[in-house]
């Protein structure tokens, strides 16, 4: 859930490159640190940064974070504030209760009980803080906006459940909504092992800092594999001292605890004009913004519910340029700057300054492939036609269904071995934090996995025209396992032609400093990837064992996308049963709780994917005319 997490303050107050901004001759902000009291008497550490050149009352832009507030005013304008600051705002940043100097207990929780008038939570803390700010911050105009990325996006979004009257606009960016169903800690009940463990340690080891777990090995794939069953994390390392990890292992299924964490279940209207922001390659919170958008849209009479999505990793839209992700260029667009300049700043300008028009669209995307900004009056677009792309037993993909003459035995199979799981990215796998290649693993070339015997590959012929996929994607697998539990991971991939030299440098001259030196010849770019866990196929609340060797349908959501598979490219699907250690190993033997599985429970299993007329495994692609 967490933007480059600890790196967020560094990103926010980064010093621009030489020649881009000159040092200010006088302070651009005044700095004040205050302790704001909330309803239960707890005081929250808060920093107020007011522009020194203000000539009139200004609105407040408020951000609430667990990562620490600045210790002084920035000497130069932060990259992510440049476009906003041109309109004039008082920037306020607050540490959540229990973090750094803020009093109280940090729960690492999004539970909100609107029926308990005595309850305190992030929703009530935001309300009380806004009440204090508009009464005590000099020269504010009585209007408040909230925004933030990741955890800061979560605390922004939670204000939707009971907004203060002065809260006039919010932009919840990459906010999680349901930590069991998707987002940071799980994918439909499958634990995101490395992320959940490392993040819980980072935020709950020490009140006064963000802590990185010290691995004995650089390649964390080896470390997690040597660790063995998940029960050993507490036994060997945490000793029950990290509450968030304890909660995870004590609640393996979608029970009352997780449902109360899923705060979006209480959201049914657009209570405040809200701009959701999502990254199509967000490696942490790709799902939440779309769920907020859909829930807020249940009642939106004033049409104030918007979503923006782009080709970004987690929080990339707040970086300086956003002209590429990994080695994938965006056709000369600086998508991050364009978002802030053309969408984010005008949104807050409209609702907090009363200047300009509200967005004329409901959804705006930067469409990858075509590398163009698009706007839509409704999402998903009504013009998109859901079309099936079929798997065939010879390893091909096509829009033609398997022939009825094919035998019911038309399938492909592989052996999945928990002792030799498929890595989720090319090894060595560095720790999640601090930084590194974690941010861009979702666009990494998938050729590293293609030739493994436990990965099935299906591929189309080269496309004879551009294929525009816009809307919600999914897969319907017909699959069986020789075990009593299993995972299936589906990866939708764009395969570049072998002559796909990147256009931003001359191959005869080679790359210039700062340009890419790697071509895209044959690059296998993931477009959408997801996992489903067999024990939860029929019920998220009550897991059950699979019947060995009995085929059944696996519905795999691949989320929302706006992507163009270009003419000459090919479409590929990879199917596998492990994705380690971003997803914990399934023992492939049903046990009541995977968190209590023992070493002897992990076993090899034969997995089959069927491709015949009765069991036609396929993708569901919303294709634009």
Image: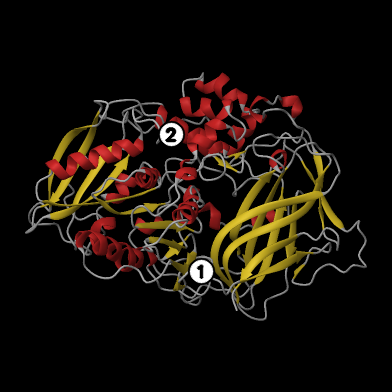
Task: Tell me if mark 2 has few (under 14), some (14-19) or many (20+) residues whose alpha carbon lies within 10 angstroms of its own.
Answer: some
* For residue 514, side relative to residue 355 (left or right): right
**Where is mark 1, residue-wise?**
368
Residue at 46%, 36% in the rendered image: 199
Tell me the CA gap for discs 1 and 2.
34 Å
Task: Tell me if mark 1 has few (under 14), some (14-19) or many (20+) residues whose alpha carbon lies within 10 angstroms of its own.
Answer: many
The quarter of the picture where the N terminus appears is top left
- First reached walking from the N terminus: tag 1 or tag 2: 2
Which quadrant of the structure image shows residue 539? top right
| Number of marks in the rendered image | 2
* For residue 74, side relative to residue 381 (left or right): left
Q: Position of residue 516 (x, y in %)?
A: 46, 66
Q: Position of residue 500 (x, y in %)?
A: 58, 74
* For residue 622, side relative to residue 176 (left or right): right
**Where is mark 2, residue-wise?**
109
Secondary structure beneath label 2: loop
Q: Position of residue 208 (x, y in %)?
A: 31, 28
Secondary structure beneath label 1: loop
Residue at 32%, 36% in the rendered image: 124
Which quadrant of the structure image shows residue 572? bottom right
Q: Is residue 218 visible?
A: no
């Amino acid at each position: 859930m967490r933007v480059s997490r600890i790196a967020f303050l560094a990103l926010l107050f980064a010093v621009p490159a030489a020649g881009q901004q000159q040092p200010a001759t006088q302070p651009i902000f005044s700095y004040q640190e205050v302790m704001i009291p909330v309803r239960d008497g707890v005081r929250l550490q808060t920093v107020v940064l007011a522009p020194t050149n203000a000539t009139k009352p200004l609105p407040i832009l408020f951000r609430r974070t667990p990562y620490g507030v600045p210790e002084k005013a920035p000497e130069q304008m932060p990259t992510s504030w440049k476009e906003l600051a041109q309109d004039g705002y008082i920037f306020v940043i607050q540490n959540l209760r229990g973090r750094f100097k803020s009093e109280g207990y940090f729960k690492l929780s999004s539970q909100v009980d609107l029926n308990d008038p005595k309850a305190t939570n992030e929703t009530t803390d935001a309300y009380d803080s806004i009440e204090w700010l508009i009464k005590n911050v000099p020269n504010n105009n009585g209007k408040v906006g909230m925004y933030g990325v990741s955890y800061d996006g979560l605390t922004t979004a939670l204000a939707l459940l009971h907004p203060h009257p002065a809260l006039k606009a919010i932009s919840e960016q990459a906010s999680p909504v349901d930590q069991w169903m998707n987002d940071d800690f799980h994918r439909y009940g499958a634990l995101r092992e490395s992320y959940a463990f490392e993040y819980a340690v980072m935020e709950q080891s020490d009140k006064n800092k963000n802590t990185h777990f010290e691995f004995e090995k650089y390649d964390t794939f080896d470390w997690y594999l040597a660790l063995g069953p998940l029960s050993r994390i507490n036994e060997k390392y945490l000793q029950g001292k990290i509450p968030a990890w304890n909660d995870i292992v004590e609640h393996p299924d979608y029970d009352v605890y997780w449902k109360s964490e899923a705060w979006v279940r209480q959201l049914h209207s657009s209570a405040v004009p809200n701009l959701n922001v999502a990254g199509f390659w967000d490696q942490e919170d790709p799902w939440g913004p779309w769920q907020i958008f859909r829930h807020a849209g249940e009642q939106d009479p004033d049409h104030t519910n918007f979503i923006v999505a782009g080709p970004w990793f987690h929080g990339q839209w707040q970086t300086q340029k956003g002209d590429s992700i990994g080695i994938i260029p965006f056709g000369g667009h600086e998508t991050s700057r364009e978002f802030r300049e053309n969408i984010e700043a005008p949104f807050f300008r409209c609702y907090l300054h009363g200047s300009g028009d509200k967005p004329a669209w409901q959804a705006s995307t930067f469409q990858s492939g075509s590398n163009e900004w698009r706007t839509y009056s409704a999402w998903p677009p009504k013009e998109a036609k859901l079309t099936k792309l079929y798997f065939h037993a010879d390893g091909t993909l096509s829009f033609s269904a398997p022939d009825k003459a094919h035998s019911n035995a038309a399938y492909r199979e592989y052996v999945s071995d928990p002792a030799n799981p498929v890595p989720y990215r090319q090894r060595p796998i560095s720790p999640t934090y601090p930084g590194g290649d974690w941010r861009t693993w979702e666009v990494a070339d998938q050729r590293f996995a293609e030739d493994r015997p436990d990965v099935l590959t299906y591929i189309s012929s080269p496309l004879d025209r551009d294929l525009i996929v816009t809307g919600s994607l999914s897969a319907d697998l017909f699959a069986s396992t020789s075990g009593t539990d299993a995972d299936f991971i589906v990866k939708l991939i764009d395969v570049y032609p072998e002559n796909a030299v990147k256009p931003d440098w001359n191959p005869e001259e080679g790359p210039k400093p700062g340009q890419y030196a790697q071509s895209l010849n044959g690059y296998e770019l993931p477009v959408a990837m997801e996992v489903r866990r067999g024990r939860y196929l029929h019920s998220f609340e009550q897991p059950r064992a699979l019947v060995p060797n009995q085929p059944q349908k696996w519905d795999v959501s691949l989320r929302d996308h706006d992507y163009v598979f270009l003419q000459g490219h090919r479409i590929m699907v990879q199917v596998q049963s492990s994705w380690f250690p971003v997803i914990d190993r399934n023992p492939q033997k049903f046990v009541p709780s995977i968190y209590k599985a023992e070493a002897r429970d992990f076993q090899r299993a034969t997995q089959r994917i069927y491709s015949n007329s009765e069991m036609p495994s396929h993708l569901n692609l919303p294709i634009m005319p």
